[in-house]
Image (spheres, rainbow, N blue to C red):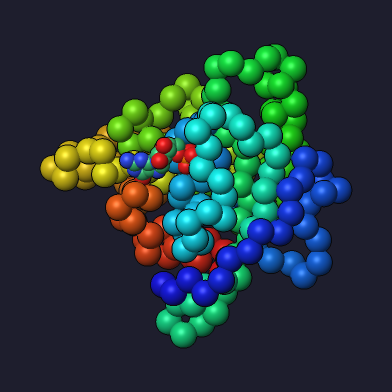
Amino acid sequence: IKILDARFLTTAVEPKGYPTGVATPEVAFVGRSNVGKSSMINALAGRKKLVRVSNTPGRTRTINFFDVDVEREGKRHTVRFADLPGYGFAKVSKTERSSWQSMITTYLEKRRDLKVVVSIIDAEVGPTSDDFQTLDYLQEAKRPILVVATKIDRLPKARRKPRLQSLAEELSLPREAVLSFSATEKLGLDEVWDALLSAVS
Ligand code: GDP
């Protein structure tokens, strides 16, 4: 995979703010705050600061859209990324939580060009109850899901494969549906891009 270009498009809260124009296949990224979502998007876009890596968990309260151009086997593809706000940050009020929920559910129900939702799980921590809830919701909404276990660098090499196996079991997914990733060590980039391109084309 060769990453050619990446650009920020817009920030939106409601459907009227979503990007319009030429239909572009879209991939959405979800995960709990601090899971490493911004770092993953930056790594997949081949950029250091396309998305701001936050020190304050739960900062992003909007959906951010980006277009990324890549080349695989001589063919050029443009994939749109939708960075959904992180969940599971304990310190939010009930009102904030419900506005977050409606932003996400509206997006997931309405977005026509959404091809796959990447559910990011911390490889070391494993799925949280919020992760399970999100995955249940996505399954109900009949959205294709790709689970990516990030921060895999934090596990000793010998524990990585067994961890992916147990994650797949915990999540009741086939083993191939769980990929591993590390933004810091740039592991799994090609595998995730391959899965994204298969999902969008
Ligand atoms: P977000 O809140 O989900 O967008 O998470 P960030 O991308 O801001 O990352 C949260 C924290 O995890 C930061 O301190 C990152 O440096 C760290 N982090 C992100 N990805 C990785 C990774 O693959 N490996 C390790 N070891 N740390 C990571």
Q: Residue at x 49, y 77 (%)?
A: 71
| Coordinates of residue 105 in the picture (x, y in percent) | 71, 35
Residue found farthest to the left: 158
Q: Along the line of sight, which residue is nearer the eye, 27 or 94?
A: 94
The x, y position of residue 54, in whole percent, is 53, 37
Q: Quadrant of residue 91?
A: top right
| Residue name at image x 69 percent, y 66 percent | 24
Q: Position of residue 95 (x, y in %)?
A: 74, 17
Query: In the picture shown, does residue 1 fall above or below 49?
Result: below
Q: Is residue 30 above or below residue 199?
A: above
Can residue 139 be seen here? The reply is no
Q: Nearer the viewer, residue 101 or 177?
A: 101
Residue furthest toward the right? 16
Where is residue 107? Give x, y as percent. 72, 43
Residue in the image at 30% along x and 32% along y:
124
Does 153 sit left or right of 65 as displayed?
left
Classify residue 3 as left or right of residue 104. left
Left or right? Give the position of 96 relative to 68: right
- Ligand 1: which quarter? top left
Position of residue 151 relative to residue 78, above or below, is above
Which quadrant holds the N terminus?
bottom left
Quadrant containing the C terminus in the rendered view:
bottom right
**Observer able to see residue 16:** yes
At horizontal 52% and vertical 74% (from top left) the residue drawn is 4
